[in-house]
Amino acid sequence: MQVHADLRILLVRRNREHVEEHGVSLDEFEAVVCAPLRIEISRSSDRRVAFGYGDDGRKLVCVYEMIDKATILPVTAYEVEE
């Protein structure tokens, strides 16, 4: 999935399922990762965590790995309370 001219999301079935099983669409994942409110590094997994809002206003957390400078591998995504 090409996200941005310089960035793409590598979709693997298992990772796609982890995102979608929490009610987050791939389009929402893409929007949050490409234009996050903030990004942190997880202390437990050392993965990047992007925070943003879904299409319906839910606050979302999107966890991913940077494979290289231009490729993201989704790990999971879920809604968090305000």
Image: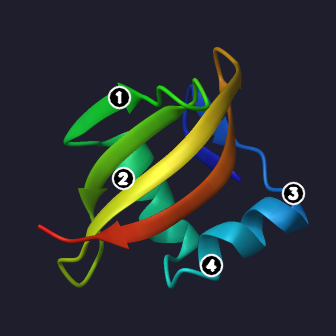
Tell me the number on the disc at residue 40. 1
Query: Residue 36: image x %, image y %?
Result: 28, 42
Three-letter amino acid code of the residue under disc 3: Val
Tell me the number on the disc at residue 20. 4
Three-letter amino acid code of the residue under disc 1: Glu
Query: Residue 59: image x %, image y %?
Result: 23, 67
First of labels 1, 2 by sequence position: 2
Q: Residue shown at 67%/51% (left/top)?
A: 75
Distance Cα–Cα, label 3 vs label 4: 12 Å
Classify mark 2: helix, strand or loop.
helix
45 left or right of 57 in image: right
Which residue sits furthest left? 82
Q: Which residue is mark 3?
A: 12
Residue neighbourhood size for the residue with mark 4, other residues' Cα within 10 Å, grouped as few (<14), some (14–19), many (≥20): some
Which residue sits furthest front? 44
Query: Residue 2: image x %, image y %?
Result: 66, 47
Viewer-closest of 1 and 57: 57
Q: Are the residues tagged 1 and 4 within 8 Å (C-beta)?
A: no
First of labels 3, 2 by sequence position: 3
Q: Residue shown at 38%/56% (left/top)?
A: 61
Distance Cα–Cα, label 4 vs label 2: 14 Å
Residue neighbourhood size for the residue with mark 2, other residues' Cα within 10 Å, grouped as few (<14), some (14–19), many (≥20): many
First of labels 1, 3 by sequence position: 3
Query: Which quadrant does the C terminus fall into?
Result: bottom left
Viewer-closest of 69 and 39: 39
Q: Which residue is mark 2?
A: 32
Distance Cα–Cα, label 3 vs label 2: 19 Å
First of labels 4, 2 by sequence position: 4
Q: Are the residues tagged 3 and 2 within 8 Å (C-beta)?
A: no
Quadrant hosting residue 57: bottom left
